[in-house]
Image (tube, helix red, strand yellow):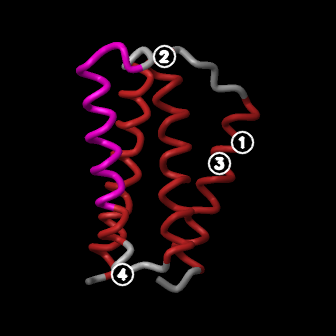
Amino acid sequence: MSNVLAWTLLLAAGLVEVVMAFALKSSAGWTRPGPSLLAVLAALGSIYLLASALRGLPLGMAYAVWTGIGAVGVTLAGAVFFAEQLTLARLLCMGLIFVGIAGLKTLGGE
């Protein structure tokens, strides 16, 4: 598997993880069938994409990037769609996560 394809699959896995979290919030505790089903399908899709990316990337690095994309993406989605506050502390922490992801990509040699 090419390096570009593996990173593309990993990015897609992280973005689908954000969809899963958004659907979980929208499911109102599993009481709404549509968002509940979307959450389950997105979770399965995200794991599938992560597993596919792992064919070409080291496990520790890929998992850290996947969770980082999810954490930053879910925080931004919460601010945009659910009016959750983006405090300076949250923004700084998201920046640190982003720097960590970029560092893993550039310094990880992959």
CA gap, disc 2 to disc 4? Answer: 36 Å
Observer-nearest residue: 6 or 96?
6
Q: Which mark sits nearer the N-terminus, 2 or 4?
A: 4
Q: Which residue is mark 4?
A: 56
Q: Secondary structure at mark 3?
A: helix
Q: Which mark sits nearer the N-terminus, 1 or 4?
A: 4
CA gap, disc 2 to disc 3? Answer: 21 Å
Please check the rendered image and state whether residue 85 is part of the magenta-colored stretch, yes or no.
Answer: no
Q: Which mark sits nearer the N-terminus, 2 or 3?
A: 2
Q: Quadrant of the N terminus?
A: bottom left
Q: Are marks 2 and 4 in contact (CB under 8 Å)?
A: no
Neighbours of disc 3 within 10 Å: few (<14), some (14-19), many (20+): few
Q: Which residue is mark 1?
A: 92
Residue 35's spot in the image, x, y percent? 29, 23
CA gap, disc 2 to disc 1? Answer: 20 Å
Kind of residue sitting beneath label 2: Phe
Q: Which mark is residue 95?
A: 3
Residue plotted at (64% across, 26% down): 86
Residue 11's spot in the image, x, y percent? 37, 58
Residue 4's spot in the image, x, y percent? 31, 75
Q: Is residue 55 left or right of residue 65?
A: left
Residue plotted at (46% across, 83% down): 110
Q: Are marks 1 and 3 in contact (CB under 8 Å)?
A: yes
> Of circles 1 and 4, which is in front?
4
In the rendered image, the vertical position of residue 3 relative to residue 95, given as above or below: below
Neighbours of disc 4 within 10 Å: few (<14), some (14-19), many (20+): some
Q: Residue furthest right?
A: 89
User: Which region is colored magenta?
Assistant: 30-49
Kind of residue sitting beneath label 3: Gly
